[in-house]
Amino acid sequence: MLQSDTILLRALEDTDLEFLYALENDPAIWGVSDTMAPISRYTLRQYLDHAGADLQEVRQLRLVICASYDGHPVGTIDLFNYEPLHQRAGVGITVLASEQRRGYAHAALALLLQYGRDHLRLHQLYCTVASRNEASARLFRGAGFRRVGTRRQWLRTASGWDDAIEFQCLL
């Protein structure tokens, strides 16, 4: 478990089913998660049953972001496309709409950067942010990520096409 004054990051547990169901089925979050349809509890249960798989094997890791003061889950932070040879991984963060703007994503990203550098020996992390998602762009820039490129009209949204901004952080 990784911990700061604000949050703790922990592995997924069987008891996270209802939390994941609420998070994954929130249409407000679908725009940043590429979700196109609701996800069933059955599908999420199957996911939880295999969530403890080794990072080296599945090349991804999902941690639950919990508020330190009472331990309730507020979001998730993911490492994906983990490449041990090149010592890099992608990062994604999702926080429940009701828990946003409380510093949880910032604290989680700071802990993940430290974990990636000190324990996984990563050389870099990267992420993709929709150009209209200024809050996420601010979050990653504030954590030391630098904008390294733009993919024009990369993301289809309800209001049309949006550019994808690529960020990278050398650890």
Image (cartoon, rainbow, N blue to C red):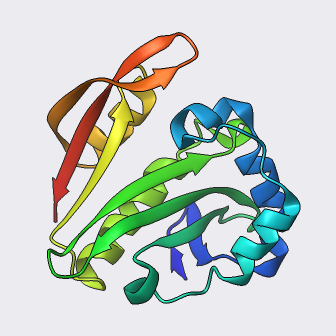
Q: Tell me: residue 93, above or below residue 132.
A: below
- Which quarter of the rendered picture does the C terminus lie within? bottom left
Q: Tell me: residue 84, above or below residue 17.
A: below
x, y percent for residue 55: 43, 84
Q: Is residue 29 left or right of residue 44?
A: left
Q: Residue at x 40, y 65 (%)?
A: 80
Q: Tell me: residue 35, above or below residue 169.
A: above
x, y percent for residue 149: 15, 34
Q: Residue at x 73, y 39 (%)?
A: 37
Q: Tell me: residue 68, above or below residue 142.
A: below
Residue sitting farthest toward the top: 159
x, y percent for residue 29: 63, 36
- Which quarter of the rendered picture does the N terminus lie within? bottom right
Q: Residue at x 52, y 45 (%)?
A: 103
Residue 76 found in image quarter: bottom right
Instruction: Determine if residue 145 is in view.
Output: no
Q: Is residue 77 left or right of residue 151?
A: right
Q: Residue at x 71, y 49 (%)?
A: 24
Exactly how many numbered labels are in the figure?
0
x, y percent for residue 114: 31, 71
Instruction: Determine if residue 31 is in view.
Output: yes
